[in-house]
Amino acid sequence: MPHQKKTNQKFPSWPIYNDQEEKILSEVVKSGKWWCGAPESHEGKFVWQFQEDFAKFQNAKFCIALANGTVAIESILFALGVGLGDEVIVSDYTFVASASAVIANNAIPIFCDINPETFVMDVNKLEHLITERTKAIIPVHLGGNPVEIDTLIEIARKNKLFVIEDCAHAHGSSYKGKKLGNWGNAGSFSFQASKVLTSGEGGAIICNSNDLADKIYSYIDCGRKKGSGSYEHFSYGTNYRMTEYQAAILLIQMQRFKEQHKLRNENARYLSKRLNEIDGIKVMKPTQGTSELGWYVFPFVFDPNKFGGISKMEFKRKLQEKGIPCVNNYPPLHTLTCFKEVKLKPGINYSTANWGGNKSDDRFFPIVSEIYSKSIEFPQELLLASPEQLDYIVEFIKLLLK
């Protein structure tokens, strides 16, 4: 493909919308039904419709829609009985929510290093992190790239642990023909503004257990039960319900997903091939067994020695100056102030954690520390660009080699 010698490329922006979103939001406003109501007495219609459609989309039996992806993880943990002093193993390379949801349940996240090729949790490092206090594992499918989930499930079953899949990046991703979120006890999703399915904020949980679905629903809807009265509260719960506005937008966004997903994957394969041909660039490798990849972000590592000793921030700045959208990766969890300085919940004993103070030193998390120090990522909307724009990126990075 020919290289376009432009310095002012206009790459796709996000979110993508048109008058369909405006029309359906207007419908919600004019209906006067701005919340979903209860199962036995529906007010609005869009949350109930979205739950049904998203469950089918992910090949799951149940979907519970709620406020965001963070409280989705929190709600699953609560419904599974994970609580005070329990340990939950989490990938060290993820957004803080994967671990803060554990903290919210008075439990203790334990950080697991990553695979240097796939950038997701290294399942071979799990067993030495398991103690008598371990209750669950949260595999994070970073960028939509599956953790080696079949092996992880075997380890979890052997040790009688729950598995909560963090699928915030993994809309549409599959491993060995099975949609992510269906391998463990439950899967959590995010519809935050940058996600490939977005309503600005919002989240969803999928599972295939009737009992677990009922427990999660009760927790996110004030301790109510399906079929009970509005002022009957059977257990502790809170209000994490999704609004009709969010669900309405998601129903329209889902109509565009298939076409966008196809284009993202075509462009990701092309861009991966071309970038991997550059000496000094290594793109995140799809986990062996991946049958579909969501490509929420497109991470890659560069070798500073091949680029004249350039720093990560300087590399990113040069791309941005040429109009190429790129962002920093998530800092490893062990480096965040809240964990390094243990600025968390009062009264909880975090001494068994493998982070905090000297334990947060990078030498204890060598792979993720190395990957983070030399990597940046393209946002998912860049993968909706034209072939000429992808070539523009590749050719500019080649120029940086010189």
Image (cartoon, helix red, strand yellow):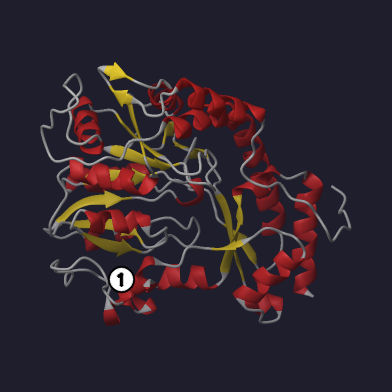
Answer whether residue 340 is visible to the viewer in this image: yes
Query: Residue 357 location in percent, x, y?
Result: 28, 80
Secondary structure of the residue carrying tag 1 is helix
Residue 371 percent across, percent down from the top left:
50, 68
Front in this rendered view, residue 187 or 215 = 215
Residue placed most toward the observer, 341 or 245:
245
Image coords of residue 370 (percent x, y): 48, 72
The quadrant where residue 202 appears: top left
Say which residue appears at 20% left-offset and 36% top-offset: 222
Q: Give me the residue at 68% from left, 47% from top.
A: 13
For the residue carrying disc 1, how many other residues have a C-alpha within 10 Å: few (<14), some (14-19), or many (20+)? many
Q: Disc 1 residue type? A: Phe
What is the count of numbered marks? 1
Camera-side residue of 214 and 258: 214
Query: For this view, does 278 lie left or right of residue 182?
Result: right
Front residue of 66/132: it is 66
Q: Residue at x 34, y 41 (%)?
A: 150
Left or right, 391 with respect to 95, comes to: right
Image quadrant occupied by the C terminus: bottom right
The answer, for residue 154, to whether it is visible in the render is: no
Q: Mark 1 sits on what residue?
A: 339
Q: Quadrant of residue 227?
A: top left
Q: Is residue 158 above or below residue 25?
A: below
At 43% from the left edge and 48% from the top edge, which residue is drawn? 141
Answer with the quarter of the image where residue 392 lies. Answer: bottom right
Q: Is residue 306 left or right of residue 21?
A: right
Q: Position of residue 73 (x, y in %)?
A: 31, 46
